[in-house]
Image (spheres, helix red, strand yellow):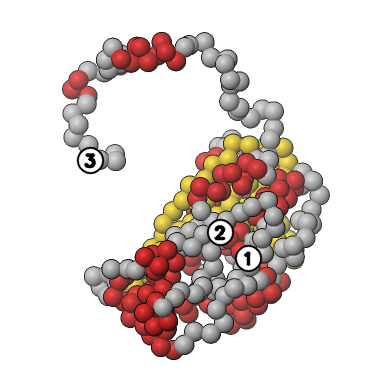
Amino acid sequence: AIPASAAAAATTVRFFSSQRNEVFDQKAKNAHRERSALMYPDGRYDYLKDEVARRLVDRLNDVSPAKKFPSALDLGSLHGSVRKGLAFTAQNKGIEKLHQLETCERLLTRDKDVDDHPEGLDVTYDVWEEETRLPYDDQSFDVVFSSMSLHWVNDLPRVFQEVNRVLKPDGVFLGAMLGGETLQELRSSFAVAEQERHGGVSSHLSPFVRDSEIGGLIQGAGFNLPTADSDLLTVRYPDMFTLMEHLRGMAETNATFIRKRYTSPEAFLAAASAYQELYSDQDGLLEATFHVIYLIGWKYHESQQSPDERGSGNTRLSATLEELAKGPLAMPGVGDDDHDGGGKKGE
């Protein structure tokens, strides 16, 4: 059984307030990205970010089938995973120009000369300091993407407001970020190891946003029609140390100001043993969860749908409830034989 303190450590989340909250050390995070770009120029650890970006970009094909988005921004573009995922969507949605904006120049330009740019797409490379205003004029873009970077932002409300500012009316923001259940197995394993050896738990992984907070943050930034949903992606590794090597290659290691600077070899070995015991599958591989939150918000435009004003309905709720109380509603043209109840639960 996992101790209560270990279970709590596995669900570390961020809390937001009206006051600025400095959680992440941006110098450390940029150093992680510099290291990743220098040590792994072949992109061997891009698989997770490329998959999330592909899923994010594909959502643009569904949100408004007939609408075109000529000008696009990729906010926190990393190595260009959104660009790589645009091969079909750029043509289908009429994307002609993509601005890639990233804090780490070396990672931004790592694949600049690689021949993976979608045909007909004009790509520019822009460097940005997270703590400053986005370097674009008001109403510059039809769509803004942000994939797998927002969970490292200190001031999410301000960044969302900036995204809203640079979007054109009826433009759309699509984001993907890691959520609170990410790497819960690794958190728990370190917590078990440290609880047994030191009688307490320290921070080894960064805190993440909760699903329930995202909608309010988007709406608070002025977006219309906000929606959010999530995926739980499971990746399997031969051991805990391989997982940590991959996290390092992804530039996803801890960059909080309160991060623990030293962990003893004994604690690492104990955590690896706990991980193996608690989270190995039938083949002996270790499962690692990546909780991805997807969010969509629209820049307001008068043509968009809006809820009816309170009290504008023509039917009283009491009358509807009285009708429902009389029995099941009859569906015209549908007989009892059409509902055999043979479907599996959830179909």
- Check disc 3 and give the amino acid type: Lys
Residue at left offset 63%, top offset 65%: 23
Compare marks 2 and 1 and give the one earlier in the sequence: 2
In the image, 281 versus 195, the foreground residue is 195
Mark nearest the camera among 3 and 1 is 1
| Residue density around tag 3, few if under 14, some if 14–19, many if 20 or more, within 10 Å | few
Is residue 62 placed above or below 252 in the rendered structure?
A: above
Residue that sits furthest to the right in the current view: 137
Mark nearest the camera among 3 and 2 is 2
Residue at left offset 56%, top offset 44%: 215
Residue at label 1?
A: 23
For the C terminus, which image quadrant? top left
Residue at left offset 36%, top offset 79%: 196
- Check disc 2 and give the amino acid type: Arg
Side (left or right) of 129 relative to 249: right
| Residue density around tag 2, few if under 14, some if 14–19, many if 20 or more, within 10 Å | some
Residue that sits furthest to the front in the current view: 199
Displayed quadrant of residue 240: bottom left
- Image marks 3 and 1: residues in contact by CB distance under 8 Å: no
Distance of label 3 from label 1 (alpha carbons): 45 Å
Residue at label 2?
A: 14
Compare marks 3 and 2 and give the one earlier in the sequence: 2
Displayed quadrant of residue 299: top right
- Image marks 2 and 1: residues in contact by CB distance under 8 Å: yes
- Give the image location of residue 77, x and y in percent: 64, 62
- Check disc 1 and give the amino acid type: Val
Residue at label 3?
A: 344
Per the image, label 3 sits on a secondary structure element best described as: loop
- Give the image location of residue 95, x and y in percent: 65, 48
Distance of label 3 from label 2 (alpha carbons): 38 Å
- Give the image location of residue 184, x and y in percent: 42, 65
